[in-house]
Image (cartoon, rainbow, N blue to C red):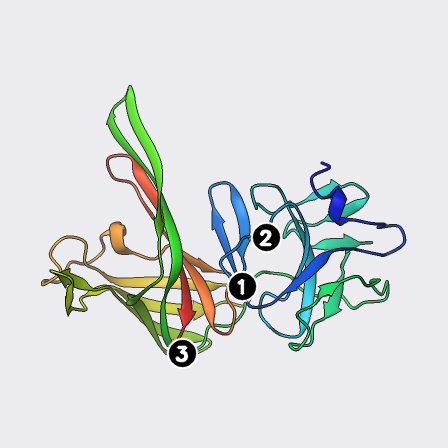
Amino acid sequence: MNICKKMLMAVGGMVFAISSLSFAGSWGKDSNGWYYLNDDGTYATSGWQWIDGNNDGTAECYCFDAEGYLYTNTMIDDAKVDSNGAWIQDGVVKTKNTPKSDNSILHQSINSNSSSNNNSITGRLQPGTYYLKSGYCDWSIAYDSNHIERGRTNLDENKYEYIILSGNENKLNFEFYDATVYNGYVTSHPLKMKGTFTRKSDGTYSISNTYGNAYDRNASYYGDPEFNIDSISNITGDSFVIHNHWEGDGGYDTYWTMVKE
């Protein structure tokens, strides 16, 4: 894999060149793999990038292909990345301190004695209101066994579609709302999904869905998977990604990147 070669100057000498430092974007995942959306709306592509995904002052180094997808569990030139995509040496994730004032392009050596970091691409959920920053839906429609239509629908920023988290970082109740718009005016904010996120010992969250109103938004409808949350990921202090999978005439996977107000 040579796609990252122009970004990698000398791994043996512990030097990475032209690697930008990011800590204001968000991780996302689709059927092709993980990607990273920078805060300016661009995607990390074609090279190495230091990313402080949870804004804790420590960044890991990742490599992305020309389409913006993360390399994982492989060798890239002379560098090895683990199953999370982080650059490792001797089984240890290489890290770099990332003061928030430093937004410059990096041309620096990596300290071979850098401490290891548990790069689980997850953090701790915080209570608050989060709105839709971006997202997409990969869908298919099976008209019959010989005619299956597939596509992707992108979701733009929409502050009328939001989720409210209440509780603490170990157990939060969630309520997901979207807007009903008539003739250009928002007429209501009906409840779309409801349930609980509970933090597990491995740092991930289990999900209990107690309300999924799929058809009549003026009535209660429990347990329909069309509007249930299947998983959450890419958790930072002020953003996370929601994933919903539903099998209908064909099926779809929807991902919402939610950002705290």
Residue at point 54%, 51% (across, down): 35
Task: Tell me the quarter of the picture where residue 181 sits.
Answer: bottom left
Mark number displayed over residue 97: none
Give how far across and how far down residue 191 sits, in percent.
Answer: 20, 66
Q: Which residue is mark 1?
A: 25
The residue indicated by pointer 2 is: 44
Residue 224 appears in the picture as rendered: yes
Q: Are marks 3 and 2 in contact (CB under 8 Å)?
A: no
- Which of the 4 image quarters holds residue 223? bottom left
Closer to the N terminus: mark 3 or mark 1? 1
Direction from residue 12 to residue 121 in the image, left or right: left
Q: Give the spatial CA distance, label 2 vs label 1.
A: 10 Å
Residue identified by numbered label 3: 127
Amino acid type at mark 3: Pro
Q: Residue at x 63, y 53 (%)?
A: 84
> Observer-nearest residue: 231 or 94?
94
Location of residue 232 in the rendering, given as x and y in whole percent from the top left corner: 43, 60
